[in-house]
Image: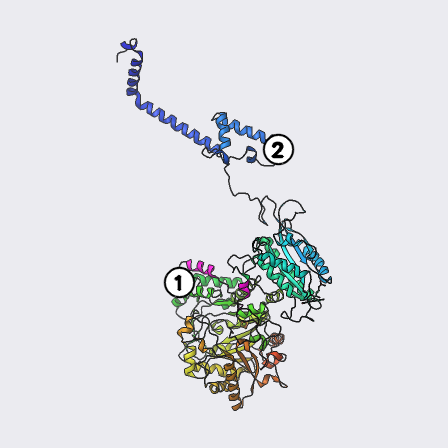
Amino acid sequence: MSYDHWDANPSAAFALYAVELWHEHRIPIILTTFCALVVLRIYLHWTADQKPAELLVFPKIYQPEPEALLAPALAPEKKKEEVNNTIAKNDETTTTVEKEKKQQNVPRRIKGELTRKTARRGSSEEAPAPKIQVLIFYSSITANTEKVAKDFAQTFGTSLAAIASEGKECPFLAPKALDLAEVDYDEYFISPPKIENEQGGGPVELFYLFLIPSYNIDTINDNVLEHLQETHHDFRIDTAPLSSILGYSVFGFGDREGWPTEEDGFCFQAKEVDRWMAKLTARKRAFPLGVGDWKRDGFARLSEWQIGLTEVLTLLEQTGGLGEGVAGSGDPLESDDEADVDEDDGEVMFDDAPTDAKATKQKSAGSLEDVEDLGRIMDMSRADGTDAKLTRAPIAIDFTTSGKIQPKVRKATAAIVVKEMVPKNSPTYTSLTKQGYSIVGSHSGVKICRWTKSALRGRGSCYKYSFYGINSHQCMETTPSLSCSNKCVFCWRHGTNPVGTTWRWVVDPPQLIFDGVRENHYKKIKMMRGVPGVRAERFAEAMRIRHCALSLVGEPIFYPHINEFLGMLHAERISSFLVCNAQHPDELAALQHVTQLYVSIDASNRESLRRIDRPLHRDFWERFQRCLDILRERRFRQRTVFRLTLVKGFNVEDEAEGYADLVARGLPCFIEVKGVTYCGTSTSSNAGLTMANVPFYQEVCDFVLALERALHKRGLKYGIAAEHAHSCCILLGSERFNVDGKWHTLIDYEKFFELLEAKGPGGDFSPEDYMGAATPEWATWGNGGFDPRDVRVDRKGRPVEAAAVPAEVN
Ligand SMILES: Cc1cc2nc3c(=O)[nH]c(=O)nc-3n(C[C@H](O)[C@H](O)[C@H](O)COP(=O)(O)O)c2cc1C
Ligand code: SF4
């Protein structure tokens, strides 16, 4: 290359030189530049990690003030120093101006959770937890309630002070008693007042209690009620303006001397306050309405109510809510109209569907999983301390032929693939849980019956209260075997229960079943806490099961460890009414003492029985008769009952004579006759059953009179002892239970347990040994059988004078 022209044209010469240079050294130039860029990139990346908050794309509005970035506890100097340090560090890579700009324009990067302004109750977050202020509103004319309210505030305050979770400050402020004659209604009942936390800091949430004596004369109560009602109806105000309070509950004082029943006005104003508060709070009834007679049980009832409330507030403190369940618990799935619930027929179904949905989502389990479950169940049983031999199931028991029990032990391979009767992912499980059953283990179930709910609401117990003195709200309805060997046309189990003649499933240990059914029963009772009309007194009583009806669905004596299960009930002084279908004579013969032993007598002859019960056993009639013989043998050991279910067109007409023959064979202590309940399911429709098959109460009466005549004709000493028209049910008794012209159908339960404890489950004692007091007059034949203490309602919940409503009866 020549450089002669440098002088003539230096710029052209330089360009020429640069091009030449490029051509000669372009590879090292490119590589050097590349390396320099890589180094720069690494450096920038590294410095970016050091300053994560500096994102350049957000506008200024998201930029918090520098002070806000710093902990409020820092001293101003320290804050300034830190800001300077941050800026100085940034200067290493960018200009100060750029740094400040970035500092102001970027949002703070937040790591972890947002800090809530209000800390959740029981949490350890920084913001002060809200305090709970219990306000006790009372009215009082003759000053009784005023004194009670003031004392109550003291004692309740003491119980609340003991509630605080471990290591945490007590969330409750001292309860305040407020006289409704002095408070400004607008301040408390149009919207909850803003209450100052006297202990300083943190918000205050409110819980309302009411102590209300009733007066059928004009008093302050009328003003209060009028105000509550007007507030609810005021179109300018939300219909539930008090929905932000935590909960409420009402207790009423009254006088049974002047106002013996609620229909007569006992505690009527407390009921009214309860009703309006439910509306104003959007059903935040935290505990059922309590009522007490000022002169008799007022204080006992009040202290029960207080115990219940303490439990509710403990739950509130721990979870922040009133607990799962029905209206009043804050459960959003509840009916949104209190009146609807008030007017239903008492049937509140617990839909376990979410669980089902989960269950159905589970992938289908194979036999291998069943084997694992079996292992699990056995392990659990041993952990429980249950006798290992009780868990050595599965046992394959052949129920298809009668004779001495011969458990057929199958080949080893068959035992390995043994399945659960009702696996969680089965349609049967889904269907049963949708109907309100809780499935326990793999073959047991528990459900709250309609009468238990009815009794909790003071609307009457089932016929077993009238006949045998059983409180329906203390009755647990359960079965240890959901499987049955019949497919009765009138079965209200919706045809979903498994059927079989042989136990071919996993056998759960009795302790697992007992614990599970008890736990689920109580859980369902607790869910009734917020239901309108539930009485605090009965609710408290219901938390102690006293009776078990082993009759829910399936065949209880199908369960191989039924005697052990009964032993567990009796050990807790829970009486047992066991209903069997007269198809398992061997198991019946092996059955130890139960409080009352039922055999279903669904027909008087072979053909009728086949049509009605649709039995799976080929030798059903022989089995049936053998069961009657066993009952006859046992009549001085067990309190035996024939249960006749009348289905018009199937087993009523002209069958009284046939039934009398069966009675002559079995000689039961009692005969219960009831009209069938139509459940309207496909099972019943498929079986050709319609409402026309349901007998009227008068028809049941006619049948019973015909049966009585037929019995007398045969020289059998039976008479009509009691009735429960509401359930379409009538009881005939052996004269053994008629003492000096008075029927004694009630049971002395305490005596039964004493005898059992003294003589053992197979001990020698007779039904007369635990015969109870005389049947109450109102329950005897001709008097209807409805407990005068309860309020009779029709299916809409309206009080009625007399009704014969066929109902679910077990
Ligand atoms: C005039 C009068 C009317 C009453 N009316 C009823 C009533 O309708 N229903 C009821 O259960 N109790 C009724 N009682 C009973 C009171 O509710 C009961 O005595 C209550 O404990 C009074 O509370 P106090 O002293 O706080 O006012 C009535 C009492 C009086 C004196
Ligand atoms: S109907 Fe049956 S389960 Fe219900 S309360 Fe009466 S006995 Fe108990």
What kind of element bears circle 2?
A: loop
* Left or right: 299, with 682 as reference point: right
Q: Amino acid at mark 1?
A: Ser
Q: Is residue 356 magenta?
A: yes
Relative horizontal placement of residue 397, taking residue 809 as reference (left or right): left
Which percent across, then down, holds residue 493?
Answer: 46, 70
Question: Hey, which residue is sitting farthest left in the picture?
Answer: 1
Mark toward the start of the polypeptide (1 vs 2): 2
Q: Quadrant of ligand 2?
A: bottom right
Q: Please state the extent of the stretch shown in magenta in the rendering.
A: 339-364
Classify the position of the N terminus by image quarter: top left
Is 209 placed above or below 597 here? above
**Residue 324 in picture, x, y percent from top left:** 54, 58
Image location (x, y in percent) of residue 234: 58, 55
Q: How many marks?
A: 2
Judge the density around disc 2: few (<14), some (14-19), many (≥20) Cα neighbours within 10 Å: few
Q: Inspect the magenta stretch and tell me whether residue 237 lies in it.
A: no
Q: Please say if 345 is above or below 155.
A: below
Which sits in the foreground, 30 or 6? Answer: 6
Q: Which residue is mark 1?
A: 367
Q: Which residue is identified by label 2?
A: 75
Name which quarter of the figure residue 800 lies in.
bottom right
Q: Which mark is residue 447?
A: none
Task: Name the mark nearer the viewer: 1 or 2.
Answer: 2
- Are discs 1 and 2 less than 8 Å apart at CB? no
Q: Is residue 201 visible?
A: yes
Q: Is residue 408 visible?
A: no
